[in-house]
Image: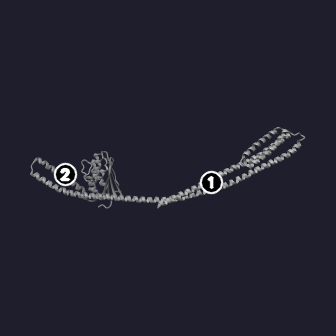
Amino acid sequence: MAKNFLDRITLRTRIGFFAAIFLLFISYILTFISTRKVEIQDYWMEHTNEVIHNLDNIMGFISIGESSFRGYLITSDKSQLKKYNESRNKTDSTLSIIQTLTSENDSQQKNLDSLRSLINEKYTWIKNVIASPPSAQSMSTLDLNGREEGVANSLAIERMITKMKQQEIDLRNDWSYKISQYSGLIQILNILSIVIAVLLTVYSLVVYNKENKQKNINAQKAEDYKKELQQRIEELGKVNEELVELRRLEKYAVTGRIARVIAHEVRNPLTNINLACEQLQAEVENEDAEMFFTMIRRNADRINQLVSDLLAATRTELNFSKASINEILDASIDLALDRIKLNQIKVVKKYDDNVCSLPVDIEKIKISFLNIIVNAIEAMDQNGVLEISTSNTDGKCMVQITDNGKGMKKAEVERLFEPYFTTKEKGNGLGLANSQNIIIGHKGSITAESEYGKGTTFTITFPVAGNN
């Protein structure tokens, strides 16, 4: 259900973002096109202004040329003709510029041809007068006729320039109108882009909040599931420990029964063998036979002792009394003190002062601890370290005995508490089995952890409450 919800949110998020990005993309394209149009219109407006400016320049150049011509007639100063010539050249070059600027406008080209003709007429008349200067007697007549002819020509030129300027002004107004339209469109598109961006931001926040909320819910569910799983693992661990302990108790009980059956089935024939041997020894007087009788009795005694040791290892008749585990450990260490000094072992005690007194069989527990301590000492070389610690945790009294000796392999650890299993050359394999049986008899447990080449740790646990 949560997965489907997240899938729906993801799909909606993708659709929303795609739609917003698509709209923004369209908006940007339209804005780009409109801006490009505005640039084009702006170019033509500048083009129109340049044409108008050049038309104004022509009027100015003609006025300067005409003034220079009249100054020459009055003063006969030829320097005035220089200004006249400059104005005419500038007029011609400006006409060429206007012709280039209006090359795509047929109407303006026709107007320009008319303007050029009028200007040429004016300059031709002035050129003729300069070529044949009038006498003083005809100056007044020339001035009168020239003034009339010049005024008419100037008015025609001015009207033509005004006409051309008006056409350019009309074009400029048209460009300006189009620019205003495109500017309005750009403004609308910008507002639309802002609205889309705001909506996209709001949409993103809404989607993020939904996803974050669902994410927190899923995270909480995952955390709850993790805690539940951890709790079940702990419960399974406890059940497994109880199962291991139950199997150990069953093994202990079975071992006891087997030991008692073996003792009964072995000792009866062994007794008959001893009796028969004594009878034969009494009847046969032979020095060579005496050696065999002695061998039979010695091995029979050895078998009897092994059976007795096995029975002792499986029989736990306990006499309980309250005692401190710390004090019992100290007593066990004292019993092994000679071995400790001989091997120069360093003993490190880490006792918990809060460890309570427990109802135990003091002598049996002392023997159990002693067996473990002796094994630890024998597993270490000289200058080894034996660490013994106690603690009171979760209603249990815990003892740990750690050495830094040679350690054991996994297969050896698994068989460590089996009767007659030993890694020592002269060991009988009953010491740790006996220790385990004593501890089990106190409703406790014992485990061993070892790493080959690094050492071994024995952990003994007693229940604080419920001991008998």
Q: Position of residue 233 (x, y in %)?
A: 38, 58
Q: Nearer the viewer, mark 2 or mark 1?
A: 1
Answer left or right for 262 relative to 283: right
Residue appearing at x 36%, y 59% in the figure: 236
Find residue 170 and report its horizontal and vertical position in percent: 74, 52
The tag earlier along the polypeptide, 2 or 1, is 1
Name the residue nearer the viewer: 170 or 364: 170
The residue located at (81%, 48%) in the rendering is 156
Q: Which residue is tagged 1? A: 30
135 with respect to 333 (left or right): right
Residue 379 in picture, x, y percent from top left: 29, 48
Residue density around tag 2, few if under 14, some if 14–19, many if 20 or more, within 10 Å:
few
Residue that extends furthest to the right in the rendered view of this protein: 137
Residue nearest the viewer, comparing 429 with 336: 429
Q: Which residue is mark 2?
A: 302
Q: Amino acid at mark 2?
A: Arg
Distance, label 2 to label 1, CA atoms, is: 110 Å
Element type where label 1 sits in the image: helix
